[in-house]
Amino acid sequence: MYDVLCVGFGPANIALAVALDELWPAARVKFVEREPAPAWQPAMMLDGADIQNHPVRDLVTPRNPRSRYTFVNYLHEQGRLFKHLNLPGHHPLRKEYARYVKWVAETVPADVDYGQNVTAIRLAGADAGTGARPVEVVTAEGRRYLGRSVVVAPGRSPYLPAVFETVPFPQAAHTSRFLPAVADLDRDWAGTLAVVGASQSAIEVILDLTNRFPAARIVNVMSGYGYRLKDTSPFSEEVYFPEFVDYYYRASEEGKRRLRDQLRPTNYSAADRDVIDALYMRMYEDELDGRSRVTLRGNRLITGVRHDQAGVTLDLTERITGECEQLAADRVVLATGYRDLGTSGRAEQLPPLLREIADVLAVDPDAGLAVGLDYRVENSTAGRDAPPIYINGLCETTHGLGDAGSFSLLALRSQAIVDSLRRRLTAPEPATAAADLVGAAAVAATR
């Protein structure tokens, strides 16, 4: 029986492992991870791609700058600190940050079972001594874990437009599987690749494809007119401050909707200037050289998709003129983002792993899953005896853009979860409890 079971060992739960080691080392904790080893975004380790957050907003620094698990200390221990400080760029390469994440995962003294694909989270029978119901985590490999609480951090589900759901891999592949989807093609491949989307990832994929397959034809299909610059104003970037989490959390549902509409360009359907400029320059240079490798199809809706052994055909409708056309491609890369928790649009009401215990979770038909400020899922009337259940990294709808797959608040979110776990799972010592009662009585006597 563990104190805490943690599903997933990506950045969110790696940060939690560091917080547990530094704030509650006595806790009995087990992490269960489906991958065979720690890795972050392995399918998007593209040459020249960088991260989009300040490197000091890492797994621990905002909570404990003196920790040995900071990105700066990682650079120091690798002997690359001064070279990194001398780099002519604002953000670290994604490859280097992935190595930092892997280094922390391998350095922190966490008890991790790799290669275990969690298939279900259930509630076990009540403990005869305490009456509490432990949580049970089951894996496809046949293992079964019991815990007094669970922290679920499986990462967000890729969003696949419905028209692509029947297209097999690798004919259609989400960016989360990009490199495996093109691994079988050689450098001289001269087919057609369609890239769907207008995000940072879409441009990164296009730039990579032009380098990887110089003879290929790349067609970028997007629902807007063209690429938009990401809003990186320092005033807008304050959405990644802990104060904004409190402000957003306490807003009404209508207030949250208005904030999301206002702040969407800080993270969605937009890209940084460096990659936009690089793509524009590449297309311009291709024109000078008398070739056209990259074509943009803006303001297009994809109304139908057909596939066979020859490839994939997209039915496109121009949103302004209404003109219809078809696009034949050998493969399609979907830079279409990820699902969030919620009840509308691309959202999913529950993380798939929590569906078996949905009856003990509080779900609002309009707002979706009810999650506390400490990231604990609130219980329904039927779940009064359920153990504490936490969501780590999927709470953008309730907590704001800091939960939108960003590193910015990982460290502080981990502290909130650990503090909450300790309060709920650690009974006060009798002497401490008696002292608290005496103190409370003394305070009351002075009023």
Image (spheres, rainbow, N blue to C red):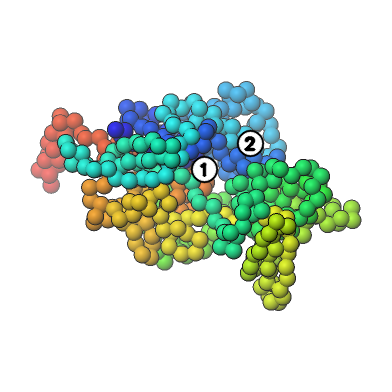
Near-viewer residue (42 or 308): 308
**Which residue position is annotated with label 2?**
95
Vertical arrangement, residue 26 with respect to residue 296, above or below = above
Q: Is residue 36 at all visible to an observer of this figure?
A: yes
Judge the density around disc 1: few (<14), some (14-19), many (≥20) Cα neighbours within 10 Å. many
Question: Residue at coordinates 30% horizontally, 55% vertically from top-left?
Answer: 359
Element at label 2: helix
Residue 414 image point, x, y percent: 41, 39
Vertical arrangement, residue 144 with respect to residue 25, above or below = below
Determine the CA span between mark 1 and mark 2.
Answer: 15 Å
Label 1 sits on what residue type?
Phe
Residue furthest out toward the left: 445
- State the count of labels: 2
Vertical arrangement, residue 164 with respect to residue 6, above or below = below
Q: Is residue 200 at all visible to an observer of this figure?
A: no
Indicate which disc, 1 or 2, sits on the residue closer to the N terminus. 2
**Which residue position is annotated with label 1?**
407
Label 2 sits on what residue type?
Lys
Near-viewer residue (240 or 164): 164
Residue 173 image point, x, y percent: 62, 52
Residue 441 image point, x, y percent: 11, 40
Left or right of 267, for residue 85 = right
Residue 75 image point, x, y percent: 59, 27
Q: Are marks 1 and 2 in contact (CB under 8 Å)?
A: no
Residue furthest out toward the front: 309
Element at label 1: loop
Label placed on residue 16: none
